[in-house]
Image (cartoon, helix red, strand yellow):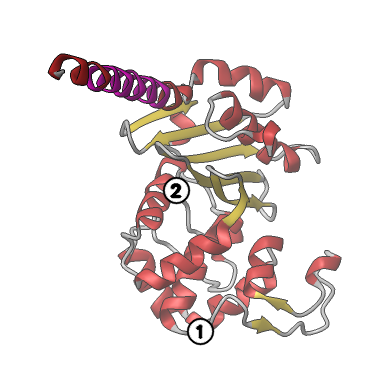
Amino acid sequence: MKTLQLIPAVRDIRFLSLLIITVLFSSINLQLKAQPDSGKWQAIFDKHDATGTFVLYSSKADSFFIYNPERANTRFLPASTFKIPNSLIGFETGVISDPHEVFIWNGTDYGYQAWNKDLSLRDAFRLSAVWVYQEIARRVGRESMEYWLQEINYGNMLTGPHIDKFWLEGDIAISPVEQIGILRKLQAGQLPFKTENQKLVKEIMLIKQTDTHHLYAKTGWAARIKNSIGWYVGFVETPFDTWFFALNIDMRKPSDQDARIAISMEILEKSGIFPVSDN
């Protein structure tokens, strides 16, 4: 009788073991799905006739994957990617009450119809409305702005003579690799700001998601300087890793505006990091 009773138990154990092995292999396969190959990224840049760099960082592997390393470590004007720290500083200093705070349009034609109206902070971030963030910088003031730039070690930490446009045509500069350093701390809630303020900024950065993947990002375009620079920076949270990225390209033609995002998303998709075609 004991022998007969043990047979189902043995079968159950074997089945359970096979199930565990299957799950483990499935997990390993999913984890190995993301396999960046920076050597193939040249073709993507060539496809869009773009000159620049792309930096990808895996939290789990603690590894960088870089196309054009020299440029990746060169500092450039951050342009509208500065809306990320500007938002953090605005919340921390209290000059922004919440993401729904409405900034009143003064009637000036800013060249984009979407900007020519009252805007909430959330909408201003999404639309990259320069005038809203210029108002935030003026509210923060030079002393407080420079203090926080030093606290977070943001690039060269210089503002220049104009507190409301130093990130557009002033002296501040940051490299793509440094951008990732800021984003890593933001995603982990490790910047020297209140945890709730970091969560608020992360929330307004969310632009795409699936059931398992979340993409947080911000564009930037330094259009006011002679040699225009374009940015796309952010991170992707997946079930097995968080991937940080920073693209920086020369803006030489109208199509480069869309190329910032297109190049980034193609690299993320081909690397198995964000399923663009399924979204």
Let me know if residue 170 appears in the view: no
- The residue stretch that appears in magenta: 9-28
Please tell me which residue lies in front, 182 or 18. Answer: 18
- Which mark, by number, is residue 95? 1
- Could you tell me the amino acid type at mark 1? Val
Compute the Cα span from label 2 to label 1: 24 Å
| Direction from residue 192 to residue 216 in the image, left or right | right
**Amino acid marked by disc 2:** Gln
Q: Is the C-beta separation of discs 2 and 1 under 8 Å?
A: no
Q: Residue at x 72, y 85 (%)?
A: 104
| Secondary structure category for the residue under label 1 | loop
Depth check, front residue: 2 or 46: 2
Q: Is residue 98 visible?
A: yes
Q: Main secondary structure of the magenta part?
A: helix
The answer to whether residue 270 is above or below residue 197 is: above
Q: For the view shown, which residue lies furthest in the left direction?
A: 2
Looking at the image, is 242 positioned above or below residue 147?
above
Residue 13 located within the stretch drawn in magenta: yes
Classed neighbour count for the residue bearing mark 2: other residues with Cα under 10 Å, few (<14), some (14–19), many (≥20) = many
Please give the residue where the numbered disc 2 appears in the rendered image: 179
Pointer 2 or 1: first along the chain: 1
Identified at 69% across, 69% down, the residue is 123
Tell me, yes or no, whether the highlighted magenta stretch contains residue 231. Answer: no
Could you tell me which quadrant the C terminus lies in? top right
The residue located at (61%, 72%) in the rendering is 133
Where is residue 138? Give x, y as percent: 55, 80
229 lies left or right of 82 = right
32 w.r.t. 258: above or below: above
Residue 8: image quadrant is top left
